[in-house]
């Protein structure tokens, strides 16, 4: 096996396990310990891993990237469908809040191709980075504290920035959507920031794939009465009826 191909496979192995030993890698790839040590030294110089006594661990940045990639790959067709539906609601001149999430990232990628002049205000470094590829999109990055294993800002400073902004639309992703309990997020600080975005917007568009419908995360972001549009790939008839009672437009 060529060195570069083996190194790529070693990196994938470490990403899956987050840490490993030289002996384990030697057995896994059927090469000498000396060869593995050279490969690990090379991967460390490239910033992917950190050598440890007798092995290696994944660097924090690589771990974050891998986590995002894994989440982005889940329900990818459903998320693409949601992104296409969401783009139809975005108009020239709109001022939009985006929070963090892999579905929001796919919307941002699609929005770059739509090529219309809008302003996007987001706490997501990933989303901001995607949108910078289109000069017609004015991007305002909402700064603040960056949590470990995250590319999103949050905290009191982030909320202070949002207080000074106004949006036509808030396009919001969340961790769970319950027909009775509303929209919920696992993180307290992210839920608080998202509530601020909703409060400073004229229209609230919530997006999420069907795997999240019916569950409840730790913190309530809003109830359905505060939502104007909910976009998902599939909603059961029972859930649809309960949500629509709150005058929410459902797009599926």
Image (cartoon, rainbow, N blue to C red):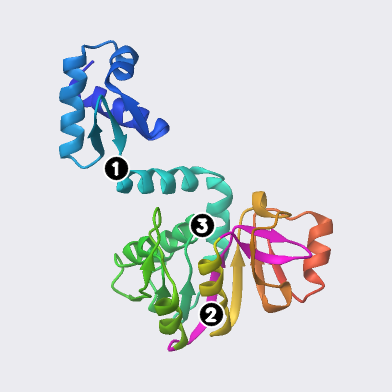
- Quarter of the image with the C terminus is bottom right
Does 73 sit above or below residue 174? Answer: above
Q: Residue at x 44, y 73 (%)?
A: 155
The mark that comes first in sequence, 2 or 1, is 1
Q: CA distance from mark 3 to mark 2?
A: 20 Å
**Residue 246 on image: x %, y %:** 78, 75
11 left or right of 197 in image: left
Tell me the residue that label 2 is attached to: 196
**Mark 2 burial class by Cα count in 10 Å: few <14, some 14-19, many 20+:** some
Residue drawn at (73%, 77%), measured in percent from left and top?
225
Quadrant where the N terminus is found in the figure: top left
Please, what secondary structure does the residue beneath circle 2 have? Answer: helix
Q: Which residue is mark 3?
A: 103
Dot 3: what SS? helix
Q: Is residue 89 at least partly visible in the picture?
A: no
Q: How many marks?
A: 3
- The image shows residue 177 at horizontal and vertical percentages of 68, 60
Say which of marks 3 and 1 sits in front. Answer: 1
- Residue on which the image places disc 1: 59
Query: How far from the left and from the top, in percent, is residue 160?
Result: 43, 84
Question: Does 149 lie within the magenta span?
Answer: no
Q: Quadrant of residue 171?
A: bottom right
Is residue 139 depicted above or below 68 in this figure?
below
Report the magenta residues as a range.
Answer: 164-186
- Observer-nearest residue: 82 or 74? 74
In the visual, does 116 lie left or right of 198? left
């Amino acid at each position: 096996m060529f060195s570069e191909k083996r190194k790529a496979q070693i990196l994938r192995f470490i990403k899956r396990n987050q840490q490993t030993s030289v002996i384990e890698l030697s057995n896994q790839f059927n090469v000498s310990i000396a060869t593995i040590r050279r490969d690990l030294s090379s991967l460390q110089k490239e910033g992917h891993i950190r050598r440890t006594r007798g092995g290696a661990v994944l660097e924090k940045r690589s771990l974050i990237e891998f986590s995002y990639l894994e989440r982005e790959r889940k329900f990818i067709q459903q998320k693409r469908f949601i992104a296409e539906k969401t783009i139809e609601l975005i108009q020239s001149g709109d001022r939009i809040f985006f929070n963090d999430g892999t579905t929001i990232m796919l919307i941002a990628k699609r929005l770059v191709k739509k090529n219309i002049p809008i302003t996007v205000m987001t706490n997501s470094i990933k989303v901001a980075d995607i949108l910078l590829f289109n000069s017609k999109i004015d991007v305002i990055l909402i700064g603040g504290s960056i949590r470990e294993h995250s590319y999103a800002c949050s905290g009191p400073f982030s909320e202070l920035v949002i207080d000074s902004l106004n949006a036509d639309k808030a396009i919001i992703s969340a961790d769970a959507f319950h027909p009775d309990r509303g929209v919920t997020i696992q993180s307290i600080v992210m839920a608080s920031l998202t509530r601020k975005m909703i409060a400073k917007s004229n229209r609230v568009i919530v997006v999420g794939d069907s795997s999240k419908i019916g569950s409840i995360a730790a913190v309530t972001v809003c109830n359905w009465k505060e939502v104007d549009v909910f976009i998902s790939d599939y909603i059961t008839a029972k859930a649809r009826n309960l949500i629509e009672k709150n005058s929410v437009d459902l797009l599926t």
